[in-house]
Amino acid sequence: MTAVLLAPEIRDGLSAEEYHADRNSVSSTGLRKLLAPGCPAQFKYDLDHPQPPKKEFDLGHAAHLLVLGEGPELEVIDFPDWKKTAARELRDLAYDEGKVPLLTKDHDMVQAMAAAIRQHPIAGPLFTPGTGIAERSIYWTDPATGIRCRVRPDWLKQLGPMNLCVDYKTCADANPDAVSRALRDRAYHQQDPLYIDGIDAAMPTDEGTRFIFVFQSKSAPYLITVRELAQHDRDIGRARNEKALRIYADCLSTGVWPDWTGPVTEIPTISMPTWDVLRQTEEYLK
């Protein structure tokens, strides 16, 4: 009997907490964790033992709220730092109320970041209020594996026969070389094609979906890099997603979530990174 694939679905108004708590689908972050340097065993443990959001993400959440108009409420704490007990108590109370606590100086900073976005000749028009929808949750079924997938575009708008998805990331350094390394280190080249595939499944258009990255430095003058992923990198990312989905489907089927090594009868060998092998071979094994 052929399994019936669930139809694509768009869920507006779903909170970030509800989206991230979904156990019946896999996200881009999850797929990236299944592949090296991650592994299924760590992915499964993290899934079963969710951790509270890291406080260093507060600035990013706040910037998203001011740029996208969507996110948790901010609570400005009028202290220079978190050293005083009273400041920490107000911070913890804000967390308990589901708010993002920010020191006054940090609130001033994210306001300046949002202003820099609005003034940028490319990023500003991309995020024009009223032209798109923030944090829309999209679900669809991967036809090759039957796995339910989900994405949550930061900003999604329709431009005639095309969808435009804009992903906003705050970072320590937004210069193009740093952005290029982030694509590799954080596997953002997997995020791009997964979002395109999900949006195309739920919102088909004649010209498909275009995905744009907007990176912004978290230090003054809050410089911005807007880029579109090279097609070759997108092809690699899509192939990585396909492999991760096969791994995920196999783990669900067998109930086995292996570590990096998996079941072996012999101890594997290990080597230095390729570049170091080549360099040291040239230097020492002449």
Image (spheres, rainbow, N blue to C red):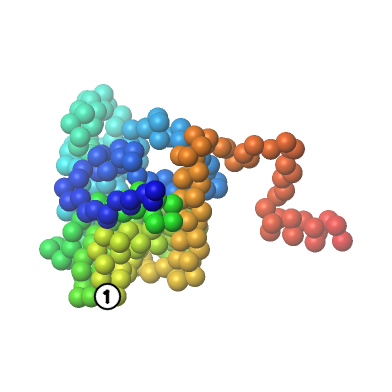
Query: Does residue 164 appear left or right of residue 262 in this picture?
Result: left
Mark 1 nearby-residue class (10 Å; few <14, some 14–19, many ≥20): few
Q: Position of residue 187 (x, y in %)?
A: 47, 55
Q: Looking at this rendering, what residue extends furthest in the right direction?
A: 286
Q: Name the residue at 25% across, 39% down.
A: 17
Which structural element holds mark 1? loop
Tag 1 residue: 206
Q: Give the vertical position of 18 relative to 176 (above or below).
A: above
Q: Name the residue at 27% across, 43% down.
A: 19
Q: Name the residue at 18% across, 31% down.
A: 97
Q: Depth check: 273 or 104 in front?
A: 273
Can residue 31 be spotted in the picture?
yes
Q: Give the vertical position of 48 relative to 20 (above or below).
A: above
Q: Give the vertical position of 267 relative to 178 (above or below).
A: above
Can residue 107 be spotted in the picture?
no
Quadrant of image for the C terminus: bottom right
Query: Does residue 233 appear left or right of residue 95 in this picture?
Result: right
